[in-house]
Amino acid sequence: MKPKLRLGLSIFATLIGLSTLLLYNTLVQDVLFKNIAFCSATGLQLTLKTMGIWSAGLVTGFLTSLLVLQDNYYPNIVLSAAVLLKVFVFVGCDSLANPFWFDSVLSFSMLSGLWMGYYAGVKFPLSPA
């Protein structure tokens, strides 16, 4: 594959991945589990929210690995950096409803879902070679 086409596919997959991650993360945090804070939620609600965020990462990682060649993991590196940037930007914000460690767990679950989705996309039998 030509380097320009590979770069174009990587940029395309990164943009689609960022929009998908933003969409599913917003769906989980602002639609399905709106106003669910750590101190006022039950254990089941917190578990479902964490699994929803993990699923958002899983779908995004799977999608980005199908959009590019199997050996191209650059979009997932950019998505991982975006998730880590989100964690470190909101560290100093006093208006967070959740403790920092809980937000870190949510971000770690998103990162693990992202890379597990990438691995599942690489091993998917119908993915492009």
Image (tube, helix red, strand yellow):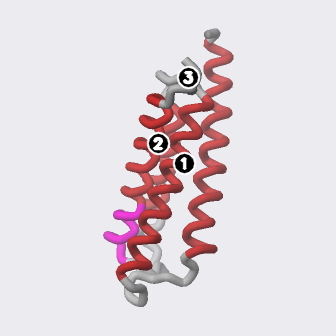
> For mark 3, does the 10 Å Cα neighbourhood hold few (<14), some (14 to 19), or many (20 or more) residues?
some
Left or right: residue 67 versus residue 95 is right
- The region drawn magenta spans 99-106
Of label 2 and label 1, which has the lower sequence position?
A: 1
Up/down of 116 relative to 104, above or below? above
**Residue appearing at x 66%, y 42% in the figure:** 16
What's the amino acid at mark 3? Leu
What's the amino acid at mark 1? Val
Residue 88, position as x, y percentages in the image:
42, 60
| Image quadrant containing the C terminus | top right
Rendered image: mark on residue 23: none
Of label 3 and label 2, which has the lower sequence position?
A: 3
Rendered image: mark on residue 69: 3
Q: Chief secondary structure of the magenta span?
A: helix
Q: Is residue 86 in the magenta section?
A: no
Q: Are marks 2 and 1 in contact (CB under 8 Å)?
A: yes
